[in-house]
């Protein structure tokens, strides 16, 4: 009996060993497409990529094998990180999962951790999300360093909670920072840039605004304005007159293109939607950012960042591994200086809202043709005590730009300078 029992035990042990061995052979990571996709879907089901860690600029954890337990972290970073369903094709996780080179990490048999370091500041990201959410309107807040190209904040509302069982509305999946909208008066700095790139002599142009010029109108008569005043007082008639008299539609289109309006690669690791400008339709309204003009908030940040950076555009990036150091000149230094001075006067003379550092900026109230307006505000910080950031706030159907300035000032003062 004892011998039989011993034999049985040996057989059982051999059987177990055989099963274990065959399992091990079967589970050895084999790089083939079928296996990869099986593993891929297994991990999507469990909502985890065990070995992947995503950290913010200061090392704070955004993703650690799975999504954060903190709802604010998840919702505020959704349009940067994305989800495991590929709902946001431009997002970090979607592009990461579509790269075969990263697939072996998904099999779970690699013990080494793979960390992706972002340039995004999680504290700023959360503060921007809370600010937008409390505003009662939807929009986007985008912040980047115009010297280095690092994206610090990219928030869009409404957002998506990846842990929620309830499917979010389709529009929540759009990253508004990378979508194109009617820019309104924030476009005027592009129109003036186009004029000065043709001839610096246009700096001395003047015009008497009576509140109406051809098909264009101002809410009230601005009186005699120089080119500089037409820009910072946002005189539609003045800008329309100067541009239509001295530029052809092709010349305005061409500079707008150089300014990045139609570019999709202003961020190296996040494609933005190509905007539009067609000055042939109405060069006057087009110079004021209406007509067929469509521009993304990232493009506006890129252009106003270039003004602050003495005419050189830095390509944006949000993953540290994509750092680029070369900037491209898109306008003469003299043009950038003129725009910077004019838009600084706009801040000190025109807007009563207080920013706790020197900066230049521009408002935009863009008529959408649907009876609503997009509210824009863009500013570049130029204070030696402040980081070299460009900040763009766009409130979709958000009404007057006054609210956009106030919200931006709160963000700059409390979060960027106070954080
Ligand atoms: Zn006017």
Image (spheres, grey):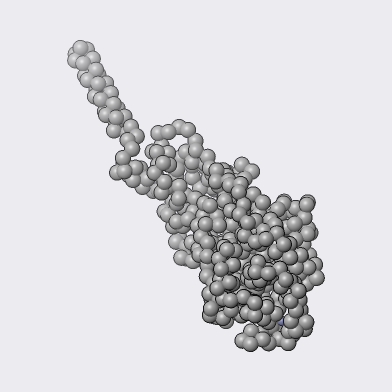
Q: Quadrant of ligand 1?
A: bottom right
Foreground of the two, 308 or 77 = 308
Foreground of the two, 68 or 331 = 331
Q: Residue at x 34, y 34 (%)?
A: 29
Viewer can see residue 339: yes
Q: How many marks?
A: 0
Q: Position of residue 102 (x, y in %)?
A: 43, 42
Q: Position of residue 45 (x, y in %)?
A: 39, 48
Residue that sits furthest to the top in the current view: 3
Q: Residue at x 61, y 67 (%)?
A: 394
Image vertical order of residue 73 relative to residue 159, above or below = above
Image vertical order of residue 34 relative to residue 145, above or below = above
Q: Residue at x 25, y 19 (%)?
A: 9
Q: Residue at x 77, y 55 (%)?
A: 383
Image vertical order of residue 334 relative to residue 292, above or below = above
Give residue 297's quadrant in the image.
bottom right
């Amino acid at each position: 009996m004892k011998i039989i029992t011993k034999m049985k035990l040996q057989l059982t042990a051999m059987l177990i060993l055989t099963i274990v061995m065959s399992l091990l052979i079967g589970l050895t990571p084999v790089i083939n497409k079928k296996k990869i996709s099986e593993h891929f879907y297994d991990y999507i089901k469990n909502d985890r990529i065990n070995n992947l860690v995503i950290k913010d600029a200061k090392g704070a954890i955004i993703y650690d094998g799975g999504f954060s337990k903190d709802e604010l972290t998840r919702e505020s970073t959704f349009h940067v990180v994305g989800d495991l369903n590929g709902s946001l094709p431009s997002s970090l996780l979607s592009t990461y999962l579509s790269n075969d080179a990263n697939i072996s990490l998904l099999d779970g048999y690699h013990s080494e951790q793979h960390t992706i370091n972002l340039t995004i500041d999680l504290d700023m990201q959360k503060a921007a999300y809370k600010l937008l959410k409390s505003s009662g309107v939807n929009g986007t807040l985008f912040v980047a360093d115009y010297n280095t190209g690092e994206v610090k904040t990219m928030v869009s509302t409404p957002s998506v909670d990846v842990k929620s069982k309830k499917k979010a509305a389709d529009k929540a999946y759009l990253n508004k920072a990378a979508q194109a909208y009617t820019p309104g008066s924030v476009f005027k700095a592009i129109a003036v840039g186009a004029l000065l790139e043709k001839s610096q002599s246009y700096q001395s142009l003047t015009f008497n605004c009576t509140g109406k010029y051809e098909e264009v109108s101002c809410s009230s008569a601005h009186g005699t304005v120089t080119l500089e005043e037409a820009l910072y007082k946002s005189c539609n008639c003045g800008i329309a007159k100067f541009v239509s008299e001295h530029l052809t539609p092709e010349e305005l289109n061409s500079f707008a293109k150089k300014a990045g309006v139609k570019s999709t690669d202003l961020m190296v690791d996040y494609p933005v939607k190509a905007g539009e400008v067609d000055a042939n339709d109405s060069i006057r309204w087009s110079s004021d950012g209406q007509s067929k003009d469509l521009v993304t908030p990232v493009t506006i940040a890129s252009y106003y960042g270039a003004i602050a950076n003495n005419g050189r555009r830095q390509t944006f990036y949000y993953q540290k591994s994509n750092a680029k150091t070369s900037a491209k000149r898109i306008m003469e230094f003299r043009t950038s200086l003129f725009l910077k001075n004019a838009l600084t006067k706009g801040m000190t003379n025109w807007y009563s809202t207080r920013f706790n550092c020197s900066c230049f900026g521009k408002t935009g109230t863009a008529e959408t043709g649907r009876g609503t307006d997009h509210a824009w505000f863009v500013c570049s910080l130029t204070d030696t005590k402040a980081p070299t950031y460009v900040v763009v706030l766009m409130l979709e159907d958000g009404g007057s730009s006054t609210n956009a300035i106030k919200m931006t000032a709160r963000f700059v003062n409390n979060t960027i300078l106070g954080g």
